[in-house]
Image (spheres, helix red, strand yellow):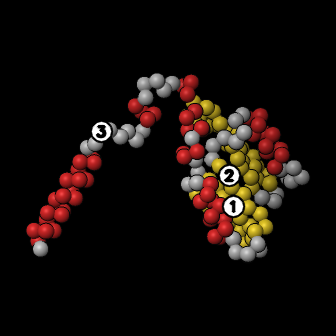
Amino acid sequence: MKNSILIIAAALLSFLQMNAFNDNASLNNFDNDPKMTVDHLIQIYEWNVKTNHTYYSGTSTSAAHATKMIALVSTGEVILEKTIQSYFMLETDVKQNAKRIYLWEVSSAHGHAQGYSASENAARRMIHLVARGDIITSKIIKSGLSD
């Protein structure tokens, strides 16, 4: 019995050690790509606005668009606080949906819930799981840029 356990443990450790030293897979393409330059970066703007009723946030491709979105969402409300911050993203990350996260939010007759998911389908499923009864409002926001 002891020999069987030792043989299985040795085989398992050998397999794990083999995968640990495998140089074929690179997890970070940014560090290994010599062609990557500043030209491959895109500047995005994250905006947040707090009003007398609620809190809004989003991302935009320009500061002017962020200002326009703040004015749009806060129509008829008093703006208490607003911020616009710029960030840089890789151009390839903007176009890949696999690297996005999805914020979901739902309001029903029984309450309000929100969370994050790795895919849009998972976000839709979470909305239907969390909301008991009739859904009053729901939304899914994809991280990154909105056109």
How far apart are the alpha carbons under marks 3 and 2? 37 Å
Q: Looking at the figure, which quarter contains the C terminus?
A: top right
Query: Is mark 1 in CB contact (under 8 Å) with mark 2?
Result: yes
Q: Looking at the figure, which quarter contains the N terminus?
A: bottom left
Against 27, residue 133 (above or below) is below
Q: How many other residues sit within 10 Å of disc 1, few (<14), some (14-19) or many (≥20)?
A: many
The residue where tag 1 is placed is 105
Q: Residue at x 40, y 31 (%)?
A: 32
Q: In the displayed structure, does residue 134 sit left or right of residue 13? A: right
Q: Which mark is residue 23?
A: 3
Inspect the image, locate mark 1, and give the three-letter code of the amino acid beneath it: Glu
Image coordinates of residue 26 in percent, x first then y, are: 37, 39
Q: In the displayed structure, does residue 147 sit left or right of residue 39? A: right
Inspect the image, locate mark 3, and give the three-letter code of the amino acid beneath it: Asp
* Residue 120 in view (yes/no): yes
**SS label for mark 1:** strand
**SS label for mark 3:** loop
